[in-house]
Image (cartoon, rainbow, N blue to C red):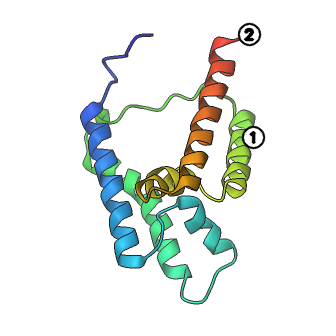
């Protein structure tokens, strides 16, 4: 295995991780809620009174942030994503992730970032399961048959 040094971005990745950690910590400290995207989105499916505004604002911010960054940063500042799959496979993968987050009672941000930082055993099991499944899929898709 080799590292693609032209696309290796440790400082960008580190700063993104720090921002995510600070945001998760502030969210739980100020709102008493876990910063799990599937839970935030899922809360809109069966909304409670006074609960819609912050969820919509949060999700709008998730969508607006990359657009704003692309306007403010030079065009070559971001690596262009390359997806080696057709639309059908992407849709199936999205549906499977949706089922997985529902079955696992949360997503990687809720369990992996927030749950692990709270030393939750359930989050540890969920995160290990997410990672193992991801490793297995890459092994099967990229390195077999």
Q: Position of residue 87 (x, y in %)?
A: 70, 36
Q: Quadrant of residue 127?
A: top right
N-term mark: 1 or 2: 1
Read off the residue under disc 1: 92
The residues bearing labels 1 and 2 have C-alpha atoms spaced at a distance of: 20 Å
Q: Secondary structure at mark 2?
A: loop
Disc 1 versus disc 2: nearer the observer: 2
What residue is drawn where x is 35% and y is 73%? 29
User: Do the residues bearing badges 1 and 2 touch, measured as CB atoms within 8 Å?
Assistant: no
Q: Is residue 106 left or right of residue 55?
A: right
What residue is drawn where x is 69% and y is 12%? 144
Please name whichever residue, 61 or 40, is drawn nearer the observer in this view of the structure: 40
Label placed on residue 128: none
Please name whichever residue, 127 or 42, is drawn nearer the observer in this view of the structure: 127
Please name whichever residue, 135 or 73, is drawn nearer the observer in this view of the structure: 135
The furthest residue to the bottom: 49
Q: Position of residue 133 (x, y in %)?
A: 65, 34
Q: Position of residue 99 (x, y in %)?
A: 74, 51
Quadrant of the rendering where the N terminus is positioned: top left
Q: Secondary structure at mark 1?
A: helix
- In the picture shown, does residue 45 fall above or below 105? below
Quadrant of the rendering where the C terminus is positioned: top right
What residue is drawn where x is 50% and y is 81%? 53
Label 2, residues with CA under 10 Å away: few <14, some 14-19, many ≥20: few
Looking at the rendered structure, the number of numbered marks drawn on it comes to 2
Label 1, residues with CA under 10 Å away: few <14, some 14-19, many ≥20: few
Q: Position of residue 59 (x, y in %)?
A: 50, 65
Q: Quadrant of residue 75?
A: top left
Read off the residue under disc 2: 145
What residue is drawn where x is 72% and y is 42%? 91
Q: Is residue 80 left or right of residue 12?
A: right
């Amino acid at each position: 295995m080799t590292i693609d040094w032209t696309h290796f971005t440790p400082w960008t990745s580190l700063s993104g991780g720090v921002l995510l950690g600070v945001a998760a910590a502030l969210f739980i400290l100020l709102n008493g809620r876990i910063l799990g995207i599937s839970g935030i989105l899922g809360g809109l499916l069966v909304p409670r009174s006074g609960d819609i505004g912050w969820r919509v604002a949060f999700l709008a911010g998730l969508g607006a942030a990359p657009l704003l960054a692309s306007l403010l940063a030079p065009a070559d500042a971001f690596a262009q994503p390359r997806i080696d799959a057709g639309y059908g496979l992407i849709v199936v993968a999205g549906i499977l992730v949706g089922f997985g987050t529902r079955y696992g009672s949360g997503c990687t941000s809720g369990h992996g970032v927030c749950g692990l930082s709270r030393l939750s055993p359930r989050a540890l099991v969920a995160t290990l399961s997410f990672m193992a499944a991801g490793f297995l899929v890459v092994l099967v898709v990229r390195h077999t048959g």
